[in-house]
């Protein structure tokens, strides 16, 4: 069965993080050390534990991505150049003036042929919390779940006020935008669907990319 509501599964069941209730295979990556970013990480950790109804005492929270390459990754903060490989499969990437959007399109003559369309748009994201999810570039059986904003204050306010029941009903697709000023949210599906079965089966297989050579990624 292919997944069509990636974010909906995260909000309703904390899936796939809930596969291990103690969150041993979940890593929270913070991209800066602002107090608001760290508070956001604590808030997300609390919400995960509340949803799963189990303490995530084996979850990793770190600034060093090399410690969590083989885990499902939750990213908090802004997108930074140092971690550019992490965002490889992201539906949108922030630019200085807006975003680079990537969407999947199919050849009209042959639906099996898929192409990635990249467009750059000038959009003011200063008031937005952005949530997006996509396959991890480090392990195809893991996901990345990003919660990002232009400033740490927007990030924290968006998480505290946006990730609540009345808004999570619109938490859908693989991209979700929440405006902290208007308190409105919008969902989109931009990337290719993937199968729940692939994620679950991945936990039973030998972990990929555990050799030292791969971990020494020069970009990091």
Image (cartoon, rainbow, N blue to C red):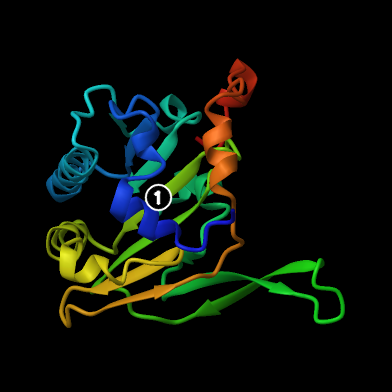
Q: Does residue 55 sit above or below 119 in this rendering?
A: above
Q: Does residue 123 sit above or below 147 in this rendering?
A: below
Q: Position of residue 210 (x, y in %)?
A: 58, 20
> Left or right: 46 with respect to 104?
left
Q: Answer whether residue 162 is visible to the viewer in this image.
A: yes
Residue drawn at (18%, 45%), measured in percent from left and top?
47
In-front residue for pair 208/4: 4
Q: Position of residue 168 (x, y in %)?
A: 25, 65
Q: Residue furthest front?
A: 1
The quarter holding residue 57 reads: top left
Query: How many other residues sit within 10 Å of disc 1, few (<14), some (14-19) or many (≥20)?
Result: many
Q: Secondary structure at mark 1?
A: strand
Q: Answer whether residue 137 is visible to the viewer in this image.
A: no
> Left or right: 5 with respect to 104?
left
In-front residue for pair 196/63: 196
Q: Position of residue 195 (x, y in %)?
A: 59, 50
Residue drawn at (17%, 73%), measured in percent from left and top?
180
Q: Residue furthest top?
A: 212
- Looking at the rendered structure, the number of numbered marks drawn on it comes to 1
Q: Position of residue 179 (x, y in %)?
A: 23, 76
Q: Does residue 187 sit above or below 4 in this rendering?
A: below
Q: Residue furthest right?
A: 109
In this figure, which residue is indicated by the disc labeled 1? 145
> Left or right: 34 with respect to 137?
left
Residue drawn at (80%, 81%), measured in percent from left and top?
108
> Left or right: 208 with respect to 179?
right
Residue drawn at (21%, 59%), measured in percent from left and top?
155
The quarter holding residue 114 reads: bottom right
């Amino acid at each position: 069965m292919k997944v069509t509501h990636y974010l909906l599964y995260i909000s309703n069941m904390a899936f796939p993080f809930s596969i291990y209730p103690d969150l041993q295979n979940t890593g929270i990556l913070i991209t800066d050390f602002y107090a608001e970013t760290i508070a956001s990480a604590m808030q997300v950790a609390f919400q995960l534990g509340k949803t799963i109804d189990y303490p995530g005492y084996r979850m990793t929270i770190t600034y060093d991505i090399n410690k969590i390459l083989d885990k499902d990754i939750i990213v908090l903060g802004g997108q930074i150049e140092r971690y550019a490989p992490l965002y490889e499969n992201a539906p949108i990437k922030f630019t200085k003036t807006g975003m680079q959007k990537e969407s999947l399109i199919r050849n009209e003559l042959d639906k099996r042929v898929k192409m990635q369309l990249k467009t750059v748009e000038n959009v003011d994201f200063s008031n937005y919390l952005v949530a997006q999810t996509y396959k991890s570039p480090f392990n195809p059986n893991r996901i990345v779940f990003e919660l990002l904003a232009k400033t740490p204050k927007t990030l924290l306010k968006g998480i505290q006020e946006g990730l609540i029941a009345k808004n999570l009903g619109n938490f859908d697709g693989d991209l979700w935008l929440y405006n902290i000023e208007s308190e409105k949210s919008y969902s989109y599906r931009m990337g290719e669907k993937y199968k729940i079965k692939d994620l679950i089966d991945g936990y039973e297989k030998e972990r990929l990319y555990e050799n030292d050579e791969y971990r020494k990624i020069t970009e990091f």
